[in-house]
Image (tube, coloured by chain):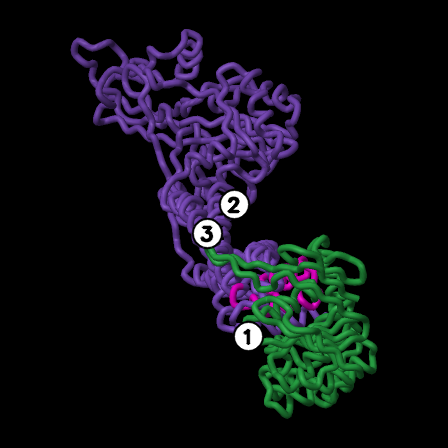
Amino acid sequence: MYELRGVTKTFSQGSLKISAVDDVDLSIGEREFVVVAGPSGSGKTTLLQLLGALDRPTAGSVLFEDRDLAGLGDRELAALRLEAFGFVFQQFNLIPTLTAAQNVGVPLAPRGGGDTRRLLESVGLGRRADHLPSQLSGGEQQRVAIARALANEPRVLLADEPTGNLDSGTGTEIVELLRALSDERGQTVVLVTHDPGIAANAPRVVRMQDGRIVGAPISVSA
Amino acid sequence: MFFVTYMLAELRRRLGRTLVTAIGLAVGVGLVITVSALSRGLDDAQAEVLRPLTGVGTDLSVTRPINLEAGPEGLSDEDRRALRAEMGGARVRLRSLGEPGEKFSRDDFVPTGQLSFPAGRVTSVRRQAGVKDAAGSLTLNAVHIEGTVPEQPAGGRAGTFERQAGPPENIDVASRTVTGVDVAKPALAAVTPGQIVRGRYLSTAKSREAVLNLAYANQNDLGVGDKVSLGGKKFTVVGLARTPLGGQASDVYVKLGELQALAGRKGRINTINVRAKSSDDVAAVAASIRKSFDGASVTTAEDLADRVSGSLVDARRLADRLGTALVIVALLAAFLIASLLSLSSVTKRIRELGTLKALGWRQWLVVRQVAGESVLQGVLGGLIGIGLGVAGALLIEAASPTLEATFAQAAQQGPRFIGPGGFGQGDVASASTTVDVGAPVSVVLALSAVGLAMLGGLIAGAVGGLRAARLRPADALRSVE
């Protein structure tokens, strides 16, 4: 599904250039559940953004289903994000003025809407559909964000520190929910975390340090 | 529906900012409505002042003025001959009135400042392109002189007092202006049926009838049914008219044929009132008459408007200049405030807008969202602005300021009294009237104001939307709210 070859992403701060992702090679297959682990500043989130077509690499190529994302225009990348990717963010990124159901409907709006209640029921929040984010707990907000990420039936689910703002118990529930949903729907999941506990239970872990992938890739058969 | 729900939810979330933006736009819109309403009120007031000047059906009037600026010597030979003929009756030869010490009384008619011309000119004017109708009239000064024939002045020219400084003390002179109107065309007459405030208009019957200027009637304690004497004939007063401000207001109006006969000017007139087929034709008709009628002065309603002065005109000028400047400044300020607030709002929502892009919203959808919110703010601002504008207009209506309009009666320049030895310069009269100024608000204006506020919202939204459009989703998601 993904083939990354020599991918580098450099940011400039004045005359200083920082390589957030440095010459990374990586392959990710269909239906894989991959955890990208590493300390803060190791380039995990930047790698995830490159995988999710949110950014373009400074060098190298990110092939998704044999298409080089670096060569696509803004409109094509937006269309790809709408059609193929679902995102879950550490801070949930829900729109505070919209209800849970309306938040789930955000990626459906460009297509004219869809069944948001069923999606909320699939994450166990059917009864909280009309609540605003401020009326939900952190775990519930993240469930709404997962339902939103699943709304457009993406082929890849990209989660950036989805447990970062949750207590460990809720974090475990969220990871289990993501795994269950991906198993059920046959989706590829790439989950970024710095939590060793989550990494320990993942079938495949990619460790990053200073923008590079370090150590031998760990793959555990499901 | 989702987009509208989202827009309304965002406006509610930022209620304070929404209200500040809306009120900023509302002040601009309110000013536009109030100033426009006031300007319209001033236009209406001026039209009210000018309506009686122009008459109900008259678009322009044609006269043949005497140019007295340079004195009698400044006249062309032709004008001088024509004027001498017109003024013949004004030369009072005392020797012919009787022996010194005898009583005498006589009436003469002299022009008010225009040369007369054949009434056939009306027909030729009526035939000109663009002319719907035309009617002639004759305006003269009726000079009544009575007294005692004085002793022969020593060393003076026998029989006349025309070169003396004034009439002898034992001779009384009174003059009044008289206009003969074509009763067959009352709408084009110098006095119209609509101006009658008491009694009735002149009939087409053969009886001698007169309509008096209301002010003249009051000054002389005359009313409907009374008699006035003109050229030694008695006329029954059948009506009183509120004579127009400025223009060629006369003291007495009679039928044209009767005045022509009394004044010895059969078949002569000195004014033609013309009705054009369309208001668009007035300028062309005026030019055509000037070209075909040598020495003619053509006065249009527009010319009359230029002769109005006073606080009404000052206020109108102020509304046109300062009011327009105020409106422009207010609107620019409102648009600027709305744009800055929209920009600030976008800056604070970078992560939210970045999330929308991450979730697959195309750029134009994000721009539409931001611009839509601004347009809704504009609608709100427009509605509040209508309220403010109407309130401002109502305040003006309630205050009902009274303004004065002064009309310089250029047409009245001319000999009213003939002194010895030449033509006296008549009064350069001016007349004033007061008029209450309203501030009517039109529905079209109110709807245009909402459109203006929406445009303001759209401009503000476009500024914010452009900022949003440039966002790269990865950068936006990295931002800290």
On what subunit does the disc labeled 3 rest? B
Q: Please, what is the three-letter code of the amino acid marked with disc 1?
A: Ser
Left or right of B187, for residue A77: right
What are the residue bounds of the magenta stretch? B347-374
Residue B65 highlighted magenta (yes or no): no
Task: Give the chain letter for green.
Answer: A
Depth check: give the residue in front, B347 or B430: B347
Q: Badge 2 sits on which subunit?
A: B
Mark 2, residue position: B196
Could you classify mark 2 by the number of other residues whose Cα lies within 10 Å: few (under 14), some (14-19), or many (20 or more)?
many
Q: Mark 1 points at which residue?
A: A40
Q: Is residue A97 visible?
A: no
Measured as percent of width and height from the top left, residue B283 is found at 57, 27
User: Given this view, does label 1 or label 3 mark the residue nearer the observer?
Assistant: 1
First-in-chain label (3 vs 2)? 2
Q: Is B220 rendered above or below residue A214?
A: above
